[in-house]
Every structure is written in structure tokens, then in C-alpha cells.
Amino acid sequence: MLLVPCPHCGPRNASDLSYKGESHARPDPNSATAEEWRSYLYMEDNPAGWLRETWYCRSGCRRFFVLERDTATNEFRNPPVPGAKLGGKA
Amino acid sequence: MSGEFKPSRLGPQSGEVIDRSATIRFTWDSKVMTGFAGDTIASALMANGVRIVSRSMKYHRPRGYMTADYWDPNGFVQVGDDPNVRSGHRLLEPGMTIDPQNVWPSLDHDVKAANGFVGRFLTAGFYYKTFIRPQRLWPAFEKVLSTFAPGGTVDLDTPHRLHDKRYAHPDVVVAGGGPAGMAAAIAAAEAGARVMLVEHEHHLGGHLLWGSDEDRALAAKMRDAADVAGVEILTDSTVTGRYEDNWVSIVQRNHPLAVERLIKARATSLVVAPGLIERPYVFAGNDKPGVMLSGAVRRMINMYAVKPGSRAVVLTANADGDAAVADLRDVGVEVARVVDARAGENVASANGPGRTVESVTLGDGTSIDCDLLVTAVGWTAPTSLLNMAADRPVYDATAARFFPGGPIDTVLSTGGLTGDGTVEQLVEHGRATGRLAAERSAVAKHRIQAHTARAAPVSGDEPAWPHDLRAALGRDPHPELFRSTTHGIVDFSEDVSSKDLVGAAAEGFDSVELLKRFTTATMGPSQGKLETVNTVAVLAEARGETIEEVGTTVWRPPYAPITLGALAGRIFEPVRVSSIQPWHEANGAVDILAGAWKRPEHYGDPAAEVMNTRTNVGIIDVTPLGKLDLQGPDVPKLLSQLYTNKWMQLPVGSVRYGIMCAEDGVVLDDGVTARLGDEHYLMTTTSSGAATIWEWAENWLQTEHPEWQVHVTPVTTGLCSINIAGPNSRTLLGRLCPDIDLDPDAFPYMHVRTGTVAGVDDCIAWRIGFTGELSYEIHVPSGYGLHVWNALLDAGADLGIKPFGLEAQRIMRLEKGHFIVGQDTDGLTKAPSTGLAPLIKLDKDDFAGKAELGWALDEFASAESKAPRLVAIQPTDPTVVPHEASQIVRAGTNEILGRITSSRMSPTLGRSICLGQVAIDAAAPGTMLTIVLADGTRTTAEVMARHAHFDPEGERLRG
């Protein structure tokens, strides 16, 4: 099982967190076109390599945070500064 | 030879692991026998003269012990109610009832052995090809074939036994307790690591146990050293898998309390030291009882004091074969001929004519009488755990075996898997590996601590990453010996011969992955530990290529088969109950599991509960209702963001209903939120949505609006919730709430008050009405829940008070036409479909789902709208209650127009009532629908004008 480095709780089993998918900025719901909005909802870049993704430490500190993960090696880098504004979607 | 040889117990041997002072009685095939403590079932059977222990899977050929250890493909027996026991591994216990399996009518006279005569029809793929057509006959084929299928008998009355689970966080796990593994564990522990040493067999020591006296003395010394160093030693335990980030699964079979225990260990470093597995040789008759591998013979002689034969031929290509010759001679077995493969000698066949070996034909045609043929032709490297860390083994033709591929940072290997050497060299390599594993583990831990905000501060800089400076073990040359000039069995558990493999390759299944699946070679209970390399070698020969070119299959988890019990483990499924549950249980409640909650479905008669509530007063325990305490100046902003309707102006003391949508416009949850004070609100969610909505609120607060000041505290279990419904509810509550003015003008519908209930301070009461009756919902500190419940029952005795359960609540909700999120809506139901379009306020700046709901409202308003409509439906025949999920079709056709989402018999109205989702052209009030019932018949039903079947104006509710 993947070990996810929660910036507050330390490395935790992935089952202690929930995976929120790729981190993309939320478009303005008042001006976004349907295509932009649905791209935000459903389309993923899914690269083989570094990816910014949002995690929620459900069974620990209950904080949302963004991590960078290499999808080819499962290496993580750049844990966020706690309290920073995060772009994420559920 | 005259008379059939029977194996027997030898006099005391210096290395024996049996306790001759502890005699154990057991039965084999209904015959009473004795063995000693420390015997495996296999050694006990052999000591009692048993040579034939099973019949093979397909051809029912007689089989005896070949490896006589965990991996023996011939040693599966039934022990009492336990089928498929590995008799080469399981220790003998007093009173064991041991029986052969897959035999009929008996082991000695198995009529299914007739399969053997038609063997040429049962080649690879036979089942696939022969029984596939005609398909209608498959059930008949299956019935016949299943009587021939191997495996023991499952006793359905077997008592439940404890299987346990454990989570462990060692620094280093060492898989394999031979000399290298023990040395690694000791060195790692001495370097300060917390170490688990896991050995598959019952004793630490590996091949030292059947070696010289000096070998055994070393094993004992290292075992003690491991103890002293604080190594946690797990014997009779198997590392079954290695997953991401060294998540290691271990099945412990010798736990004092549990039948098995599954240990999930997160190891910082893993040391893989499984040793080598001796490989069988492929030749005609290689599965005859009396053909044994050199390791099996040496274990039987040295550890269990069993004489495996009287006159032996030994085919040897290595030192282990030579040692077997010496061991046999030491215990008085005549070695008729040593066939030295290094000198080009070979064995062509083991011959009968009886069921066991009676003679051996050599490569040059010489025939030698014997009752035991020992082979020592080389090794399989069990690289499984390395494969699971993405390592790909590489074949070395000079050493005639596979070796690990590249190095992996935190998965290190040592011992015979990595090379050859003297015991001292293996131990030294093990020690170096253990030290490296411990050093790398220390660096990894330093990194974790340094990168964890809440961890204790680390001292000093991060140590340098320890490089692998181990001196590699050498590789001894070894002749490549896989198949003789004849064909024989390659996979003993699946009865697959080399001839089958050659035939399958000729048919086009000539890639190793295809060949394996088509013939099932390597797919039996030995999982390729004995068969993989021979399979690859036979295929290479058939293709005219080298083993390197053919490549090998990749071992996936598990390393050894795992029982379902070990996987299931102890049941860790916490069930939530309210503090009133003891009363429910004492008063005839029939419970239902709703999500994580156990709660009363009813108390015997839900229809009577409905009628009493509508006539007098009823109370229901609604504690599972999700409850979030919200505090802070920005709560209204959060509410506006979560709900589709408006919340900025909710007055203190008011309650409002709202629905929440996800960003795709689909209904996520609904409920009421009350404003208790200036900056204090209590939100309720559906029972099943409690956790989701808490997370949803946190998501908005943490990601999009970290500037909002709101504290969200889940109080679902902190407050016990009771709904009091019915015409007498105001009178009842008035008797218990001295400081709350219940006058309808002072406390109107959709308002909230705080005060004392039955002497309990700080209770919250609000007037809402999903039952359609005058009702109050009270939330009391959960420790007082039972007290308040009892106080209500006492105070309401003369008012006709009765409890009601979830079923009565559902009936009353449906009578009122209130939809249930997830029951009447689904993962595609956008908010307009529920009929609550007026609650969607697009003039708000933002709220979850706003963009989609704007488009959804436009779509909903168009004549061609594809969105379903939630409507109330009443069957024409009031006695017919269509099942939930019954289809609604266009009359006279099979065109689906929708489905029934909720249906009940209404005791209030005396007729069946439903909610359903239908297409736009079936949604107009008065439309006659056709519903397909569960039995296929059709019935008609009418679409109603309003969702509420009962009291649509809500007069009872607001009174």
C-alpha cells in the first residue's frame, strides 16, 4: 500500500487518506463555458511523470493538501506549507 | 526385487528434531499409527511405512513424497475437517485423523486411475476443447468433472475459529531464516534496528538443519544470538507478499490463540533471503513413489530419522547430491549406483511395473534394480518478493539458475538467492546485508521525521545514503539439467507433462505466459516453486532457443497460498448504536443495519406505529442523523456555498431546509440547519451523508475559502436525537420543558429553541415535520438520551405514546412525498428533477453546483428535456405495491419511461403509494403509467398532481 507523506501526520497508509484527484483551479462558475466546466470536472491530464494531486487526510489531521507525485515511481515531493490556499476539487 | 520396500524409523540421529519420549497416536486412512512430537505428517507416515500418499489430479497416478516439505505437490491430505493440508509441513498432533483425498474408492485401488489409460486424450487444453460444445451440456459435464476434481472435503459444520490480524512497524523484515537471513537479522538488530525474522519452516537454520553437526551447532548459536539481539522471530510464518513502500504481509501459522494471524508490516527495509528450492528432474516415471529430491532424503534422514529406501540410485550434479549419497550410506542404505551428471551420466526412466520404483534405466540403457531414486539437478531461485518490488530475474547459464536483476534501495537480497559460497561466506554476506538494511532504514526514518510537521525535531543533518559496498557472492558452475531424453511430469500438482508443453507450443501457445495459462503448468498449489524453470526449459527446447531468450514468468503475490480465513481475519466492523439502544433491545425492536448504525426498524408492527403516531403521539430515536456544529462569523457564507438556497439572512431561532449539490449539479444531501445564536448554527445531514458532508464543508473551507472563519465540529454521536410526532406531541413536550414556550405563536413551525428537557440542560428543540404531523425534534447530550427517552414514555403514558421505528418513519415520509437522497435520487439526478427548482437560487454569487444547475434548469424547462421527473404515483389497484426499482414502460411496448423509486402500503390511506422517476412525457398529472411487476405482469398507475399523498396542504404539520 502506498505511503502518503501527510505534512502534518507524517507518512500514512493511503487508506487513511482519500484521494481527490489532480489539482486544477476551479473555474468561475459565473463565466465558465460548459466545456471549461466539464473539463474541470471530468478531464485529467494523467501524465506518466510528475503530477500535482490533492489528498485529504481523512483519518488523521483532516487537512486537504496538494502533493506532487511521480506516477511512474510513486515518489512524492514538495509537501505544501500548511495553511496555504490550495486549488482542489472533491 | 523381492517384496516391496517400506520406509521405516531409524535409530537416533544427531540432528533429529523429533522427541522420542513423546509418542503421538494418529490415524491414517482409518489405520492407527504412532509418531513422535516434532514429526511432520509426512515424516510420521513415512516412518510408518507409507509410500503412496496421494493420487494425482488428472490421471490419478499413485504419488509419494518428493520434496517432503511445504512445497511437496503430492502431499495434500485431509486432516479432520481441514482439507488440502500440506502434510510435508504440518506438524503431527495427538489424535489427528488424517485421510488421503481425491481417491475413490481407496488410495490403493483408485478406479479413477483409469484416466491414466486414456491419458493421451487428457492432454493440455483437453477440458477447454472437449467440453466447450455443445454449451447446453456444460452443466452435465461439470457434474461429472467435479467428482474427478482434486481437493478435500469441506465440512459445512466446521466451528468458527479465530483468525487474527496485527499491524507492525518494524525497521527491517528479514524473509527467510537460513544462515544468511539469520545473520542479516542479527546484524541489523545489533545496528539498532527493530527486526522481524520470518521463517517459513518450523525451525530456524535452513539447510544447516540437515547438514553436518557443525552446521547445526552454528544454527543453534545464531538462533541464540538473534534472541539476545532482540530480533522478533516468527517461525512457521510466511512473508506472502511485498507491496508498495514495503507493505509486507506475513501469515503466522503458529500463533498460540489464533489458527492463523495475518501481520501487515510496514518495513522500512526488506531483506529477502528465502534460499533456493530444489528443482525436480523431468524424465519418464519421475512421479513414481520412490523418486525423491536430495534435500527431501537428507531432511528425512537427518531431521526425522526416517530411512527412505533400502537400495538407491542417486543422480547428482552438485555437492548436495553428493552429501545425500553420504547420508544414505551412513544409515545403511545401499547406494547401487551414483549417476554423476557432471560426468555426462544421466537417468532415462524410473520403472515399475508396480506402483513404486523398482528399477532405473540410465541414459546408456543400463537397468539397475532399486527402490529409491534420488535426484540433485539444481535449483529454482524463488525471487518472488523481489519480483513484487519490480525486479526482473536474469538467467545465468553457467550457474544453471536465475538470479535477481538490479539492486533496489530498500529491498535487499542475500543468501543462496544471490550466489554460492561456504556457510561462512553466506553468513558474512548476510551480516553485510543486515547492516546495510539497518543503515538505510535509519536514514529513511530521519527523512520522515524531518519532513513531518508534528514529529519531534530531528537532531543533526541527514546522514548520507549508505551505498551498497557488499562483496557479491560467487556463482558455482552447474550443469544445465532440466529434461532427460524422455518425457515426464513437469507440473506434479496439475499433472502436466513435458509432452503436453511441447504439444501446446506446437499449437501456437509458445510464449511462456500463454503456455502457462493454456496448460495450467505452474498454476497449482506449488505456484511454480518447483515447476517454473522446467516449464521454461522445455519451452526453450521446443522453440530451439535458450532459456534467456524465452524468459520467465513473473511471480506475483502471494508467495504461498493464503487461506480465506487469514485474509478475512478478525471482524473489525464497528457498529454504532445510540445511547437508547439498550431500551430498544429490551422492548422488542427488530434492528436494521443502516450504514454504520444499528437502529430499530420496527417494534413488531410498523403500520400500527404509523397509525398511533398520526392519532396520538410517537417517538423515534433519530440519533444517526448527521449533525455538524458550526461556529464563527462566516457560517452564513459557508451555508450559502453548500446549499442551493439562501442563508445570509436566517434569523436567530429559525430553521431552514436546503439541498446540497455536488459540482456536477447532482443532489448530494439534504437537511435542515438551525441558527442557535449570532455565530452558532447546527446543521443536520442525512444519516448516510454525515461523514461526506463534514468532509465537503472542510473541503470548501480549506481549499477555496481559507479566509472564512468557521469551525466545523461533528456532533452526530455527541447529541442523542429524538423526534416526537403526532397531535399530542405539544402536550407531551410541555410536560417536560418548563423553560420553553411551546405556544404555536411563540414557537412556530421551522423554528428552534434551546432549553431544559426532562431536567437536562442545554437541549435543542426544533419544529420540523418530515412525518407530516406536528412534531418536535430534540437533541440532548447523548449521555442523557436514555433518560430523556424514558421520561417521554412516562410523561406520555396517558397520551397514547408509542415508539416507532425506521420503517414507520419511511412510510410516513412517503405519505408526505418527501424524497430520500440516494433512494429516490441517484448518481445522475440533478436538483431540478426532484421538484425543488425554486430552492435553486442562481442569483447568488456562487454555490456548489451553480454552473451545472444553471444549465440544468434551462434544459429542464425545454420541451425536449431528457431529465427525469420525480413524481408521486398511485397504482390503480390499491392493493398492488410494485417493488422498488420496478420499471415503468410505455403502454403496449417495452420502452422504458422510468422506475419506481419508493413504494409502500399506506396504512393512513389504505392504499399503495409510490414515488418514481419518469420521463417528461409521462410526468403530467393524470398520466396513466404501465408498471412491470416482479412477476412480469403489468399494472397501471396514475401520476399525482403533488408529491404528498396525504395532507398536501400541511395543515397538521403547522398547527
Image (tube, coloured by chain):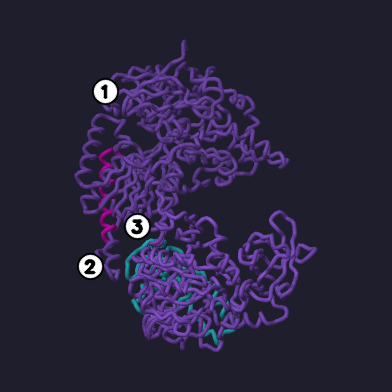
Chain colours: A cyan, B purple
| Chain ID of residue with mark 3 | B
For disc 1, the neighbor class at 10 Å (few under 14, some 14 to 19, many from 20) is few
| Chain ID of residue with mark 2 | B
Nearer-the-camera pick, B286 or B691:
B691
Where's residue A51, x and y in %? 45, 71
Quarter where residue B307 is shown: top left
Can you identify the residue that label 1 sits on?
B21
Can you identify the residue that label 3 sits on?
B409
Amino acid, disc 2: Val
Query: Which disc, if any, is residue B490?
Result: none
Q: Residue at x 31, y 41 (%)?
A: B177
Residue stretch in magenta: B421-443
User: How much space separates mark 2 and mark 3, taking CA atoms?
Assistant: 23 Å
The answer, for residue B693, to whether it is visible in the render is yes
Can you identify the residue that label 2 sits on?
B458
Q: Considering the numbered disc 3 on the image, is that residue within a helix, a strand or a loop?
A: loop
Residue B754 lies left or right of residue B929; in this view the side is left
Q: Is residue B439 magenta?
A: yes
User: How much space separates mark 1 and mark 3, taking CA atoms?
Assistant: 49 Å
Q: Considering the numbered disc 1 on the image, is that residue within a helix, a strand or a loop?
A: strand
Amino acid, disc 3: Asp
